[in-house]
Amino acid sequence: MSTPATGVRPDGVGQVAVNVREIPRAVAFYRDTLGLPFLFEVPGAAFFDCGGLRLMLTVPERPEYDHPASLLYYRVADLHAAFAALVAAGVRVDGEPHRIAQMPDHDLWMAFLRDSEDNPFALMAEMPPAG
């Protein structure tokens, strides 16, 4: 592996920000509905652990940062059960669970939903191949 001209080589993603309008409402969704472990809150932001990646819910501080979130794909063990639980909790659905790709050793499945702030997100699971 070559060394970049800058000498900088990130070793992974440490944090992802999701824009929200109301911190308390978003915290309730991500903690109580989605089930992510809550880490801490500061004025204008709340933080969660997402499998070692820190997820920051934040009210945009400047107009150029006020845009929809990037689409986050949350890995779950049982896609259909997780999807059903979120639907039962009143989470808005953008797309039912469906197979995206067939791999040699698994099928990739996804379902698309919306959080309390209307940001899209997805659930994903690598499942045993069909048939």
Image (spheres, helix red, strand yellow):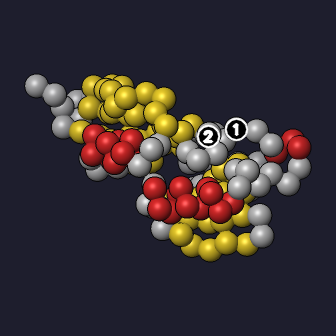
Residue at the disc numbered 1 = 68
96, above or below 122, in the image: above
Give whichever of 33, 65 is nearer the camera: 33
Give whichever of 115, 3 is nearer the camera: 115
Give whichever of 130, 38 is nearer the camera: 38
User: Which image quadrant for residue 28?
Assistant: bottom right
Query: Label 1 sits on what residue type?
Result: Pro
Q: Is residue 10 visible?
A: no
71, above or below 57, in the image: above
Position of the C terminus by quadrant = top left
Label 2 neighbourhood size at 10 Å, few (<14), some (14-19), many (20+)? some
Which element type, helix, strand or loop, lies under badge 2?
A: loop
Query: Label 2 sits on what residue type?
Result: Asn
Q: Is residue 30 visible?
A: yes
Whole-percent x, y for residue 79 in the image: 31, 42
69, above or below 28, in the image: above
Figure label count = 2
Q: Which mark is residue 21?
A: none
Whole-percent x, y for residue 130 in the image: 16, 28
Residue at the disc numbered 2 = 119
Task: Give me the residue at 66% from left, 41% from top.
Answer: 69
Return the disc, 2 or 1, that comes first in the chain's sequence.
Answer: 1
Task: Confirm or deny contact between disc 2 and disc 1 (CB under 8 A).
Answer: yes
Whole-percent x, y for residue 66 in the image: 80, 43
Task: Give me the residue at 33% from left, 27% from top.
Answer: 98
Left or right relative to 81: residue 3: right
